[in-house]
Amino acid sequence: MPQNIPVDDTLLNQALKVGGFKNQSDTINAALASFIEKHQRDEVIKLFGTMPCDKSYDYKAGRG
């Protein structure tokens, strides 16, 4: 769906060049995907240390 959103041309052209994208649309889509992935990753990182661990689990048992 086409949108008319003001975007900093300098940033867009730099991202287009650095990312090696074919057009501005691909550049913007990749930037949005990267933004989403980063924030989802940050949410997972926040979970570290919040889950109880099983003290009886033998993590060495599966090694050969």
Image: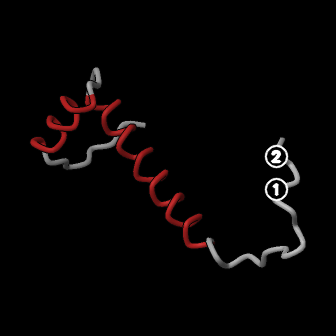
Q: Quadrant of residue 29?
A: top left
- The residue lying toward the viewer, choosing from 5 and 35, is 35
Position of the C terminus, as image quadrant, is: top right
Q: Is residue 40 above or below residue 34?
A: below
Secondary structure of residue under mark 1: loop
Q: Quadrant of residue 28?
A: top left
- x%, y% of residue 13? 15, 35
Task: Please name the residue that numbered disc 2 is placed on.
Answer: 63
Disc assigned to residue 60: 1
- The residue lying toward the viewer, choosing from 41 and 15, is 41
Identify which residue is drawn at 44% across, 44% down. Answer: 33
Determine whether label 1 and label 2 are within 8 Å by CB.
yes
Question: From mark 1 to mark 2, how far is it between C-alphas?
Answer: 6 Å
Residue 41 shown left or right of residue 59 in the figure: left
Secondary structure of residue under mark 2: loop
Residue 26 shown left or right of residue 40 in the figure: left
Q: Which amino acid type corresponds to the residue marked 1 in the rendered image? A: Lys
Identify which residue is drawn at 18% across, 29% down. Answer: 17
Identify which residue is drawn at 86% across, 48% down. Answer: 62
- x%, y% of residue 1? 43, 37
Mark 1 is surrounded, within 10 Å at the Cα level, by few (under 14), some (14 to 19) or many (20 or more) other residues, namely few
Mark 2 is surrounded, within 10 Å at the Cα level, by few (under 14), some (14 to 19) or many (20 or more) other residues, namely few
Q: Which amino acid type corresponds to the residue marked 2 in the rendered image? A: Arg
Instruction: Give the colour scheme of this rendering.
Output: secondary structure
Q: Is residue 39 above or below residue 15?
A: below
- The residue lying toward the viewer, choosing from 37 and 13, is 37
- x%, y% of residue 47? 62, 72
Q: Is residue 47 above or below residue 15?
A: below
Identify which residue is drawn at 26% across, 25% down. Answer: 20
Q: Is residue 1 above or below residue 46?
A: above
Disc assigned to residue 22: none
